[in-house]
Amino acid sequence: MPSLRGWGLHPIAHETLDLSLVFHSLELAFPAKGLQEIPGNLQADQAGRERRAGIRLGYLHIDSHTDAYAYEPADKYNAATQFTHVAEEGLLDASRSWHVGIRGTTFAHGVVARTRELGYRIISLDELVRGGFAQRMAEFRDEAKGRPVYICFDMDVFDPSCAPGVCSPSWGGLSAREGLDLIRCLTDLDIVAVDVATVSPPHDVNGMAAHLCAHVIYEMLVLLARQRGLVG
């Protein structure tokens, strides 16, 4: 198993992180994938574990879309409805779950209102940037206190200028530096699962989204390692 060495001004600069220690110490879902139908199954599985322990998950969904859309009976399960189902099926505590980075246009009417009706809190990209990453994530930390957290990170929260190869690009997103800084603000959470979606290789340019996705995963691993006391 390879090691990763901290880069630049990273909080663990000059530390060496042995990935085998991270994976052997964690019993979490940590997939990286292209299609976003997959997280629904992972969310249900992880939520089932926590529910058996008498606790419902809190979710931090970082994305340009809520993925909490209404559905037709003939097309009930798709990439735009996963957060609808987990709320309707009681697999999470929607009142302690946030959709962060929401922006842009969508094909359906009333998506934001519907997401709020399901109990979620929405933080638009403008609210996130103007309020400050550290302040907004501190608010989420207070909201999720004492509750296991599932982080779902969609690569289209980034601007297409730095992550062109995603499934639903939307202009006006985070820069690479901003997105990585946001992840570094996710401290002092009881993170039990992470997924990173939705790189689309056919749409990528010189592997830009893929390489940025790899760095997002690296930052998440550092976050988890620090949470488990594996690095300072």
Image (cartoon, helix red, strand yellow):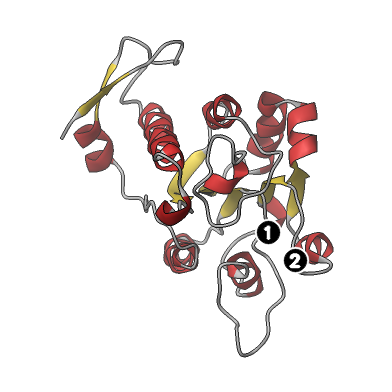
| Kind of residue indicated by mark 1 | Ala
Check the image and name the residue furthest to the front.
205
Q: Between 139 and 75, which is closer to the camera in this rendering?
A: 75
Q: Horizontally, is 200 left or right of 21 in the view? A: right
Tell me the residue at 58%/68% (across/down): 82
Check the image and name the residue furthest to the left.
1
CB under 8 Å between discs 2 and 1:
yes
Tell me the residue at 73%/57% (across/down): 120
Which image quadrant: the C terminus?
A: top left
Which image quadrant: the N terminus?
A: top left
- Percent of width and height locating residue 23: 26, 41
> Quick check: 76 above or below 157?
below
Q: Quadrant of residue 222?
A: top left
> Quick check: 23 above or below 3?
below
Q: Between 67 and 56, which is closer to the camera in this rendering?
A: 67
Q: Which residue is mark 1?
A: 94
Tell me the residue at 83%/69% (across/down): 109
- Percent of width and height locating residue 228: 36, 32
- Percent of width and height locating residue 10: 44, 16
> Quick check: 74 above or below 3?
below
| Kind of residue indicated by mark 2 | Leu
| Label 2, residues with CA under 10 Å away: few <14, some 14-19, many ≥20 | some
Q: Which mark is residue 118?
A: 2
